[in-house]
Amino acid sequence: MSWALALLGACILALAVIAVAHAALPGEIGPGQAQAAPMVEEIADEASPEPEGPPFLAFGEPVPGRKIISPWGLRKLPWEDHGRLHEGVDIAADAGAKVLAVADGVVVGRGVAGGYGTYIEVKHPGGLTSFYAHLGSVERKMRVGRAVAAGTPIARIGNGGTSTGPHLHLEIRNGGDPINPILFLNRRFATADDLPVEMAETVSPRVRLATVSTIPESKRALMAAKIAKAKAKNRRGRLPPDLRLAQLALQRSAD
Ligand SMILES: [Zn+2]
């Protein structure tokens, strides 16, 4: 029986060696060390160090140096009867100018859609997407599923869909809902919690009357009828100032 005892002894010794080796592995916390963890957390809280490495999300400009000519918010266009949400910002630029991805992401859509004309959509971390519309063209290699870095040319400025001249309509969406892009452009966010999503969802009740330089072709008949109706309503055939401007824009559009 001594051989069996010797084998058992050898097994116990081997297990003990494995246990010692395991306990000595660097970076592992044994049961006796678990109590030390909260202290480390407390020290981290007091120091609140700057997060290291790149920010969670950094936004640039889609057409660097070009101005926003129409902001996010309730807006009434000359051919409309009521104000409605302008779901993005309009940035004036020359037809053919490059449109850049505003942040790192993946192309999730491209195509042509009604009033938007040609568009491309890029999904970013944190559930946000950027949507670019009225485009002249989308870069051929920007297929759905392609990863893009911030600042990569993805499309060209155009005047497609319901548009009053060459410009970019840029939307930032949170899970499909449009939010105010102005709170994101040219800003960096260290963590997902820093994204000002709630603030960007807020819509001011003020409706802005938009003046336009031209009337889109698809709205010209509607605009002419609206002007004629307003003239007929007034005994002297006079128009209110916003419609007078719209009439000038209509005349300009017919050239
Ligand atoms: Zn727009």
Image (spheres, helix red, strand yellow):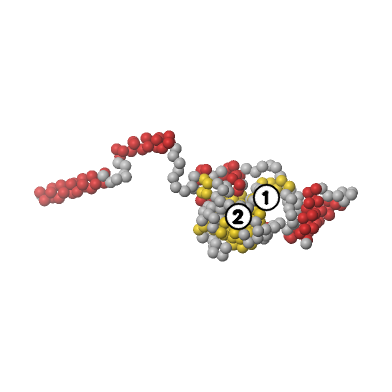
**Which disc, if any, is residue 70?**
1
- Which amino acid type corresponds to the residue marked 1 in the rendered image? Ser
Does the Cβ of the disc 1 residue fall within 8 Å of ligand 1? yes
Q: Mark 2 points at which residue?
A: 63
Q: Nearer the viewer, residue 189 or 206?
A: 189
**Which disc, if any, is residue 204?**
none
- Horizontal relation, residue 34 to residue 145: left or right: left
- Horizontal relation, residue 234 to residue 177: left or right: right
Image height check: is 225 above or below 182? below
Image height check: is 76 above or below 47? below
Residue farthest along the bottom direction in this orientation: 140
Residue 80 on image: x %, y %: 74, 51
Which residue is at a point 37% across and 37% down the rendered structure image? 40
Residue farthest along the right direction in this orientation: 235
Residue 162 on image: x %, y %: 69, 58
Which residue is at a point 57% across and 59% down the rendered structure image? 154
